Image (tube, rainbow, N blue to C red):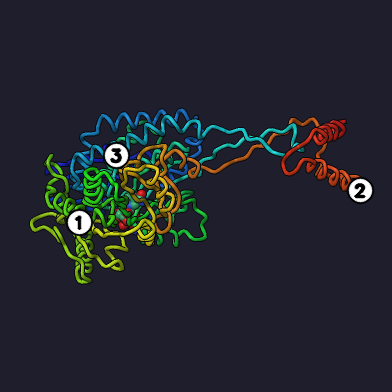
């Protein structure tokens, strides 16, 4: 069988891995289960160190050919991929909902659409960014020379992804790495391997040469093998604790890395916030994806003048959210990805309650099959507890009042994380002024999370939320290295700083220093121009 993902008799999907342009099966398997029911959806190969090494070797073999292809040719293939994603969008989005549990509308409007938006922006915008750039030098002593910067691919790039946006995140990073001229080895999350297998069939169908894109499925060990495999670049998205382990494993290797890690995003409500929009935004950005989104709002700071009304409105709306199967069009909140994730969130809520927090709605797991957690609102949460300090990957909204803006800014910035934040106010100038004071990678005013996938908008954080910026065309700079090419027309026989050295040379060097300084730093006067010209003419004779 050579399709990458297929359902044998009985309906359980069977995924394969793609290495060097060929699909491989393996007896060692990893299971993927529907988080809404716990039922087995399919299995994929559990790749070991040798499988990963083979994939990296194939990617390395394919690298020179891919790097040598004109940028337009690479982007044309990514456009074909975009068309395939578009055409197969419904099937892909359904698979996301099966494997991840999120409502189908989210699979379509957030995950798939984010992937398509990024591809559209990349196919249009990557060309100018990757083209050789002419640069001007400042010294007249370099007269007669020209300089160009070439963007050179890194080589083989590993992409390690999480499960929460199983299309938008890997598609964006794989496409960026490929556009930059790198070949790719992709290790998806063990909790989203079937989506990855299906996505990989489309990437192969787009017509990439063998070995340019490779898929290895597996668990965290498979990821660790990829980290240790000697790849030239690594794009990692996942938890801060895994990011730290990877950086430790890479220490000494000088691998170019981007780390997109966890967040603890603040939602800051000013007294003049547009009330209805702010309440709706608060509920959505706390609960979409069952709160399992890196840029979910996880701490709500509300001006005291609005606080009682805001608490009441948010609680009423969160309590009404429909929780259930992602395939029910009315569902707003699906299951959590796993029992372990659900228990972790539950422990954080219980710890907060033990410290004095009050649960206004929800508060724990829902009974029945699947890993559902009731959307939860809390107040009076002790600021030092994990629910306010550590990432909470669940539909949980802790609300707290503040009295003045300085206090609000201090609360927002008092976090080990710094991914993003949102500010809600009728005064956009005030919103932007406040944005300058927040220690995060993105600030949205009167909206949240929506720039992910826009190729003109960088994505990434500061502090424990990561290193580097991704999901935008600027990431092409980080996925390439620069080669400076300096050229001299070859007319002068020597330069001021060349041999022979001697008394004359010393005097000349001093004279030029004075001449070039004649009008101050970097301002070159006519005398200096004439002197340089004469020097070079004389050197030419
Ligand atoms: P995770 O760290 O458990 O796993 C992420 C990936 O890393 C998986 O593919 C996993 O198999 C692999 N992995 C685990 N241990 C590894 C190791 N030692 N070496 C190499 N690879 C290893 O994260 P998760 O639970 O899949 O995802 C949720 C986390 O991702 C949250 O913290 C969330 O905030 C973060 N996230 C961040 C962003 C962002 O853009 N900043 C986006 C989405 C998710």
Of callouts 1 and 3, the N-terminal one:
3
Q: Looking at the picture, how far across and down is residue 15, in whole percent?
A: 25, 44
Q: Distance of mark 1 from mark 2, alpha carbons?
A: 83 Å
Residue 473: quadrant of the picture:
top left
The structure residue drawn at horizontal position 47% and vertical position 35%, both measured from the top left corner, is 66
> Disc 1 marks which residue?
308
> Disc 3 marks which residue?
199
The structure residue drawn at horizontal position 50% and vertical position 34%, both measured from the top left corner, is 129
> Furthest residue to the left?
368
**What element does badge 3 sit on?**
helix
In contact (CB < 8 Å): disc 1 and disc 2: no
**What element does badge 2 sit on?**
helix
Q: Looking at the picture, how far across and down is residue 17, in whole percent?
A: 31, 45
> Furthest residue to the right?
503
Of callouts 1 and 2, the N-terminal one:
1
For marks 2 and 3, give the one nearer the viewer.
2
* Badge 1: residue crowd in 10 Å (few <14, some 14–19, many ≥20): few
């Amino acid at each position: 069988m050579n399709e990458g993902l297929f359902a044998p008799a009985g309906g359980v999907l069977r995924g394969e891995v793609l290495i060097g342009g060929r699909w491989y099966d393996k007896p060692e398997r990893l299971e993927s289960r529907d988080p809404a029911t716990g039922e087995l959806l399919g299995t994929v190969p559990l790749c070991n160190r040798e499988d990963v090494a083979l994939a990296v070797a194939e990617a390395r073999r394919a690298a020179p050919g891919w790097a040598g292809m004109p940028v337009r040719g690479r982007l044309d293939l990514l456009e074909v991929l975009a068309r395939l994603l578009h055409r197969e969008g419904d099937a892909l989005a359904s698979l996301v909902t099966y494997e991840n549990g999120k409502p189908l509308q989210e699979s379509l409007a957030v995950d798939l659409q984010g992937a398509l938006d990024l591809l559209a922006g990349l196919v249009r915008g990557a060309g100018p960014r990757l083209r050789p750039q002419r640069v001007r030098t400042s010294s007249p002593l370099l007269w007669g020379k020209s300089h160009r910067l070439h963007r050179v691919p890194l080589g083989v790039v590993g992409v390690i992804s999480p499960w929460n946006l199983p299309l938008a995140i890997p598609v964006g990073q794989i496409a960026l790495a490929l556009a930059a001229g790198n070949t790719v080895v992709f290790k998806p999350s063990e909790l989203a391997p079937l989506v990855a297998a299906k996505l990989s069939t489309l990437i192969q169908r787009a017509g990439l040469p063998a070995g340019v894109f490779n898929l290895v499925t597996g668990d965290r060990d498979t990821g660790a093998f990829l980290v240790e495999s000697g790849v030239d670049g690594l794009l990692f998205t996942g938890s801060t604790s895994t990011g730290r382990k990877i950086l430790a494993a890479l220490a000494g290797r000088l691998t170019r890395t981007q780390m997109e890690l966890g967040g603890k995003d603040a939602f800051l409500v000013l007294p003049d916030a547009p009330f209805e929009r702010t309440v709706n935004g608060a509920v959505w950005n706390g609960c979409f994806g069952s709160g399992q989104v890196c840029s979910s709002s996880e701490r709500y700071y509300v001006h005291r003048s609005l606080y009682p009304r805001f608490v009441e409105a948010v609680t009423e709306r969160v309590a009404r959210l429909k929780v259930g199967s992602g395939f029910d069009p009315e569902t707003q909140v699906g299951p959590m990805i796993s029992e372990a994730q659900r228990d972790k969130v539950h422990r954080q809520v219980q710890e907060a309650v033990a410290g004095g927090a009050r649960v206004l709605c929800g508060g724990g797991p829902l009974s029945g099959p699947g890993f559902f957690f009731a959307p939860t609102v809390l107040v009076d949460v002790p600021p030092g507890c994990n629910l306010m300090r550590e990432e909470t990957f669940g539909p949980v909204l802790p609300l707290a009042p503040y009295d003045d803006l300085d206090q609000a800014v201090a609360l927002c910035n008092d976090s080990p994380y710094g991914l993003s934040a949102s500010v809600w106010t009728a005064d956009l100038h005030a919103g932007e002024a406040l944005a300058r004071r927040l220690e995060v990678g993105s600030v949205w005013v009167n909206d949240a999370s929506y720039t992910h996938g826009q190729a003109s908008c960088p994505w990434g954080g500061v502090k424990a939320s990561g290193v580097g910026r991704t999901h935008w065309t600027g990431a092409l700079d980080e996925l390439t290295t620069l080669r400076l090419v300096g050229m001299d027309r070859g007319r002068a026989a020597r330069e001021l700083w060349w041999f022979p050295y001697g008394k004359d040379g010393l005097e000349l060097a001093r004279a030029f220093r004075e001449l070039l300084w004649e009008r101050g730093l970097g301002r070159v006067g006519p005398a200096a121009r004439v002197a340089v010209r004469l020097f070079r003419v004389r050197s030419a004779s």
